[in-house]
Image: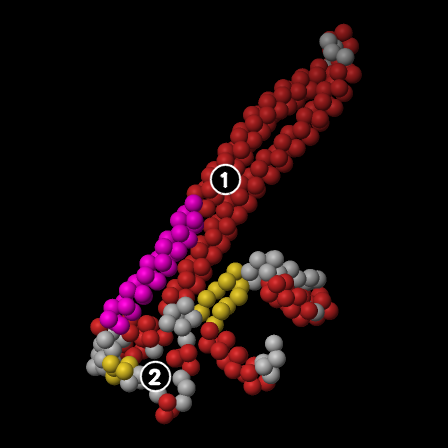
């Protein structure tokens, strides 16, 4: 119907004409209001003269609808902005905690490294003194050889602690990378959901409310029936080759299409006797 806007001289238009049978467009809600708003140059619609009052009523009605949907769109955008602010705050808090843990690990790692260097220096000194016995005699040995063994064992323990701290530092670094990836993924997902919801509202507005979207809830009967339908069509035998062993339905959206609904009811009346309630 919107393509008729390209005809600037169109002033007489007939969608409902008994000589040509029923037109499914005319059975939709807000049909005349929709036509008069988008084709304001019409003088006659469906063989009837269009009054100025009808055009004014159509303009007023459609403007109210547009204001209503604009309000809902702004609400979605505001909620998206608030969610993004909370997400940024959570990310900042998490980064502060990870950086604080990293600072503590770095400080501890420096202490361990310094202690390790001191122990290695002591071991090297003891080793030099122990080797000097072959040159100067045992009277020159000032340290117990058992201390050398204890120091070497202590050095190994300190090296193990250092390796453990380095592993934790690597884990914290990986956590920061994972946090950035998670943040970008959530950010992209939030904006995708926002744009999808806005697109749905615009579809409702542009179709005069004849197409509507409804998000399902687990307690809705039609939600559970859709879930059962999808699960009944899932074949574990066929999907096991792809490593898929099950399916879980997390979201169901119902589309109200008045045109298809009218067609369904017409077919139903032909096939079913509705006289008996």
Side of 69 where 183 appears, left or right? right
Q: Is residue 192 magenta?
A: no
Asked if 21 appears above or below 70 in the picture, the reply is below
- Tell me the colour scheme of the image: secondary structure
Where disc 1 sits, the SS reads: helix
* Residue 120 picture quarter: top right
The image shows residue 100 at horizontal and vertical percentages of 53, 30
The earlier-in-sequence mark between 1 and 2 is: 2
The image shows residue 196 at horizontal and vertical percentages of 45, 60
Q: Which residue is mark 1?
A: 90
Q: Which residue is mark 2?
A: 15
Asked if 5 appears above or below 77 in the picture, the reply is below
* Residue 252 picture quarter: bottom right
Which residue is located at x 57 percent, y 41 percent?
Answer: 175
Where disc 2 sits, the SS reads: loop
Which residue is located at x 45 percent, y 59 percent?
Answer: 197
Segment tinted magenta in the rendering: 53-82
The image shows residue 203 at horizontal and vertical percentages of 41, 67
Side of 78 where 124 appears, left or right? right
Front residue of 140/201: it is 201
Front residue of 17/38: it is 17
Q: Is residue 66 magenta?
A: yes
Asked if 200 appears above or below 161 in the picture, the reply is below
Which residue is located at x 50 percent, y 68 percent?
Answer: 255
Asked if 230 appears above or below 106 in the picture, the reply is below
The image shows residue 46 at horizontal and vertical percentages of 31, 83
Front residue of 218/143: it is 218
Front residue of 140/207: it is 207
At label 1, counting other C-alpha atoms closer than 10 Å, the crowd grade (few under 14, some 14-19, many 20 or more) is: few
Q: Nearer the viewer, mark 1 or mark 2?
A: 2
């Amino acid at each position: 119907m919107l393509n008729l806007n390209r005809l600037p001289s169109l002033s007489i238009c007939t969608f409902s004409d008994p000589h040509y049978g029923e037109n499914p467009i005319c059975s939709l809600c807000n049909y005349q209001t929709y036509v008069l708003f988008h084709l304001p140059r019409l003088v006659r619609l469906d063989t009837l003269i269009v009054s100025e009052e009808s055009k004014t009523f159509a303009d007023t009605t459609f403007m109210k609808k547009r204001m209503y949907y604009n309000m809902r769109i702004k609400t979605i955008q505001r909620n998206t902005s608030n969610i993004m602010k909370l997400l940024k705050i959570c990310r900042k808090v998490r980064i502060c905690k990870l950086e604080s843990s990293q600072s503590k690990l770095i400080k501890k790692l420096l202490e361990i490294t310094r202690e390790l260097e001191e122990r290695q220096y002591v071991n090297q000194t003891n080793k030099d003194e122990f080797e000097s016995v072959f040159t100067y005699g045992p009277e020159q040995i000032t340290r117990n050889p058992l201390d050398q063994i204890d120091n070497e064992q202590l050095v190994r323990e300190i090296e193990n602690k250092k390796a453990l701290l380095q592993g934790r530092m690597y884990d914290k670094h990986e956590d920061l990378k994972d946090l950035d990836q998670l943040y970008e993924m959530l950010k992209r997902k939030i904006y995708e959901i926002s744009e999808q919801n806005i697109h749905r509202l615009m579809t409702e507005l542009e179709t005069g409310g004849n197409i509507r979207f409804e998000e399902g809830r687990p307690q809705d009967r039609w939600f559970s029936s859709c879930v059962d339908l999808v699960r009944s069509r899932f074949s574990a035998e066929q999907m096991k080759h792809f490593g898929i062993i099950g399916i879980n339905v997390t979201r169901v959206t119902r589309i109200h299409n008045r045109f298809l609904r009218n067609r369904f009811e017409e077919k139903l009346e032909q096939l079913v006797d509705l006289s008996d309630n």
